[in-house]
Every structure is written in C-alpha cells, then in structure tokens.
Image: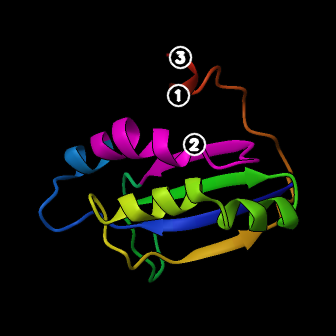
C-alpha cells in the first residue's frame, strides 16, 4: 500500500466551515472517482501544537502501489479533481507519496461519508 498526504489551505474568501462543506460535499465526490483509490481521508486541523508548517487540513489517499497511484494521476478523473481545487482552496499545498509503518492501527470508524449515501 502507498499513500499520498497533502496540505490544504482554504481560499481567503472562504470561512473554515464553507471550505470543509465544499470539500466534503462537492470536491470529495469528484476526487473519490480516481481509479484505484483505496482510501480517502480529510483531516481538519483543529489546532497546531508545534512546528513551522501550517495548514487548514490534510488529505490522505491510499493506492495499492506507486504504479496504481501513477495510473490514477494520469486519469481524466484526477484531472477533473485538480481542476476543481481552485474553486475552494489555494493551489499552494505540499504533497508527499509515503509508505506507512503502522505501529498501532487506528480504530475502525465505520462507513465513510461517501459510503453512507
């Protein structure tokens, strides 16, 4: 499994509530169409504890491997998702491709927001 992690910054004309509402209700269904996407999590920053990096939210997306990620990145579905980002967020986020080393697995949280429809 491979994961991408990225920082997200709301546009200056969006409140935090409007930013998250747009992301969860409009952008997420577009982004979730990425072929081979195995997981998708948006984490709202509640407060910063320490360090230099600031962000309004983080996004995580899982793929089977780097090849699956690269195939998705070249797809029209991902192009559509990137085209929508500017509708609610700044285009200055930083993104990484990472490999997880799970020490304590997170608790199972049930179906995701997109799976409840």
Q: Which of 68 and 44 is in front in this view?
A: 68
Mark 2 or mark 3, whichever is nearer to me: 2
Whether residue 87 is situated above or below residue 104 in the rendered picture:
below
Distance from disc 1 to disc 3, alpha carbons, whole Å, reads 6 Å
- The residue shown at (16%, 68%) is 12
Residue lying at the far bottom in this picture: please name it. 52
Is 59 situated above or below 37? Answer: below
32 left or right, relative to 22: right
**Dividing the image into 4 quarters, which one contains the N terminus?**
bottom right
Marks 2 and 3, how far apart in space?
14 Å
Provide residue 3's location: percent of width, then percent of height.
Answer: 74, 59
Q: Which residue is the site of mark 2? A: 32
Q: Which of 53 and 86 is in front in this view?
A: 86
Residue corresponding to mark 1: 114
Quadrant of residue 52 within the rendered picture: bottom left
**Which region is colored magenta?**
21-44
Magenta span contains residue 45: no
Res. 20 mark:
none
Instruction: Give the class, few, some or many, for how many residues have Cα within 10 Å of label 2's Cα (few <14, many ≥20).
Output: some
Q: Which mark is residue 116?
A: 3
Q: Which residue is drawn at 75% across and 42% down?
A: 38
Query: Percent from the top left, x then y, of residue 43?
Result: 49, 49
């Amino acid at each position: 499994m491979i994961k991408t992690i990225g920082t997200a910054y709301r546009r200056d004309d969006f409140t935090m509530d409007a930013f998250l509402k747009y992301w969860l209700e409009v952008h997420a269904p577009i982004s979730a169409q990425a072929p081979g996407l195995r997981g998708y999590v948006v984490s709202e920053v509640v407060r910063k504890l320490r360090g230099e990096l600031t962000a309004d939210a983080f996004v995580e997306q899982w793929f089977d491997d780097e090849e699956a990620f690269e195939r998705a990145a070249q797809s029209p579905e991902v192009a559509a998702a990137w085209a929508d980002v500017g509708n609610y967020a700044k285009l200055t986020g930083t993104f990484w491709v990472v490999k997880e080393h799970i020490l304590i697995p997170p608790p199972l949280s049930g179906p995701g927001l997109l799976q409840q429809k």
